[in-house]
Amino acid sequence: MLKKISPIISPELMKVLMQMGHGDEICLGDGNFPSESIGKRVVRADGHGTEELLKAILEFFPLDTFADDSVFLMQTVSKTEPVPQIWASYRNIIQSSEEKAVFNDFGMIERFDFYERAKNCYAVVATGESALYANIILKKGVVIL
């Protein structure tokens, strides 16, 4: 083990985060997300929720400052569905991170367009998240030293 790295960041996930370059995207898929059929690289994070993974990832992961949106959510299928509670949690996690200055709001993507975008992500993290509409895509930015 190393110090200051959350134990839910597996060696495989850390490797993927480090391999990603500016503009690459990573999808955190909930337990219902078709990770294996969509992802060209799939990192298993069974037993972990997207909220705890998002918080741990943002300790290392810069969001893209050059894009209009750097965080994307899958829209609910019906406009009459209530806003998923997990989205407020995502907002709080991002606004509590060092990436708060970069974050304006979520880019919303229709369900099937979200699947297509996820196919082009550098990797998909298959989580054990049970909340509905908990899928989230992060666009990587640059680290300025």
Image (cartoon, helix red, strand yellow):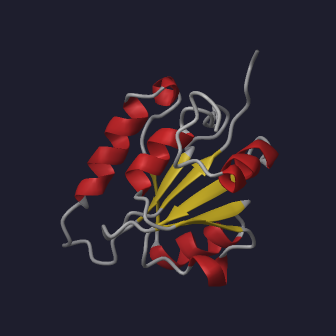
Residue at figure coordinates x 77%, y 47% from the top left = 20
Task: Tell me residue 141's x, y (percent).
Answer: 69, 36
Q: Is residue 24 visible?
A: no
Task: Tell me residue 69's x, y (percent).
Answer: 55, 44
> In the figure, is residue 125 to the left or right of 134?
right
Q: Given the current orientation, which residue lies at the most extreme top position?
A: 145
Residue at figure coordinates x 38%, y 28% from the top left = 96
Q: Is residue 22 visible?
A: yes
> In the figure, is residue 93 to the left or right of 126?
left
Front position in the image: 57 or 73 = 57
Q: Tell me if residue 77 comes above or below residue 108 in the rendering.
A: below
Q: How many marks?
A: 0
Front position in the image: 127 or 96 = 127
Q: Tell me if residue 10 comes above or below residue 113 in the rendering.
A: above
Task: Tell me residue 22's x, y (percent).
Answer: 77, 41
Q: Quadrant of the N terminus?
A: top right
Residue at figure coordinates x 46%, y 75% from the top left = 111
Front position in the image: 57 or 45 = 45
Residue at figure coordinates x 40%, y 58% from the top left = 49
> In the figure, is residue 92 to the left or right of 83?
right
Q: Tell me if residue 130 comes above or below residue 73 in the rendering.
A: below
Q: Quadrant of the C terminus?
A: top right
Task: Tell me residue 28's x, y (percent).
Answer: 53, 60
